[in-house]
Image (spheres, rainbow, N blue to C red):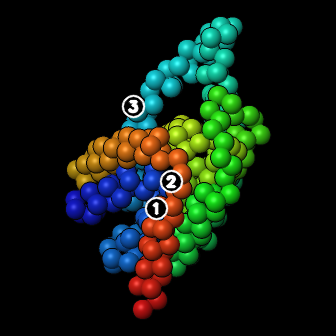
Amino acid sequence: MELVTATLLALLQGVTELFPVSSLGHAVLVPAVLHWNVDLRSPEFLPFLVAIHFGTAVALLLYFWRDWAAFAAAVMNFRDPAGKDERRIFLYVCAATVPALVVGAVLEKVVRAEFAQPLLAAAFLIVNGLVLLIAERLKSRGTRPLEAMNLKSAVGIGLAQCLAFIPGMSRSGVTLAAALAAGHDHAAAARFSFLLGTPIIVAATVHEAPKFLHSGAAWQMPTLLACLVAGVTAYASIAFLMHYFRKHDFDALDPFAYYCFAAGALALGLLLI
């Protein structure tokens, strides 16, 4: 893969993986619309994909390291009542992760093979925008902190996350929407969404790591640069979004919904011409 193309795809991944606009949808649409010579199903593409996801996972771990350190301390000192809230949140992150792991193991290849078509990705990007818009209109005006989450809500958010296997549907978008529906404010919903994304992205990276390490393309400059670019961009995206959701708790998802409508409609138009 050319260095410029690798860098642009890494930038795209670093932003769209965490913004509620579907990284997979953009990975399908952008090369198709701009006529890039990128084959997403090519064996040579796997090392690149693993590298950019690894960069994103590192960014998530670095930004939320205090949360994960607190989880580890609370679990190791499970008799300490002071760590009760951290243990509860960690339990809910684990519970919400299970549905996506099951779907990923059983149906991921089937779902992505059927839906990884540019026209369908563009259509589902519009659907994703509709989900964001509806979530803002139907959410309760609750301000429940993350510590007040219950197991039912966590599992519901985890089930919603499974929709992200469809290109065009955003993992962060559907989990944010589900958390808002459970009565949490945008900041709490975003924090849980990003915490939930960490084990999923790490698991996907570890699963493909052996193939990555045995690939000659893994150590080429475009792949290594893409890992760095994706990580830096993802960290900046997390910092921006956490600040944004803390400052905007009214219709905060609307701009992303309008973007999805515009990008999906534009992609459909260009693909059909």
Amino acid found under the numbered disc labelled 3: Leu
Compared with residue 125, is residue 153 higher up or lower down, i.e. above or below?
A: above
Taking depth in this image into account, of 257 and 11 the one nearest to the observer is 257
Amino acid found under the numbered disc labelled 1: Pro
The crowd level at tag 1 (other Cα within 10 Å; few <14, some 14-19, many 20+) is: few
Please state, as top left, top right, bottom left or bottom right, where the N terminus lies in the image.
Answer: bottom left
**Residue 153 spot, x, y in % from top left:** 73, 41
At 38% across and 78% down in the image, what residue appears? 33
Compared with residue 46, is residue 82 higher up or lower down, i.e. above or below?
A: above
Is there CB contact under 8 Å for labels 1 and 3?
Answer: no
Q: CA distance from mark 2 to mark 1?
A: 7 Å
Instruction: Inspect this view and state whether residue 98 appears.
Output: no
At 42% across and 46% down in the image, what residue appears? 244
Q: Determine which of the numbered discs, if any, sits on residue 137 in the image.
A: none
Q: CA distance from mark 1 to mark 3?
A: 27 Å
Of pointers 1 and 3, the one earlier in the residue sequence: 3
Residue receiving disc 1? 255
The crowd level at tag 2 (other Cα within 10 Å; few <14, some 14-19, many 20+) is: some
Instruction: Inspect this view and state whether residue 7 appears.
Output: yes
Is there CB contact under 8 Å for labels 2 and 1?
Answer: yes
Tell which residue pokes out farthest to the right in this image: 152
Please state, as top left, top right, bottom left or bottom right, where the C terminus lies in the image.
Answer: bottom left
Residue receiving disc 3? 62
Residue receiving disc 2? 252
Element marked by disc 3? helix
Q: CA distance from mark 2 to mark 3?
A: 25 Å
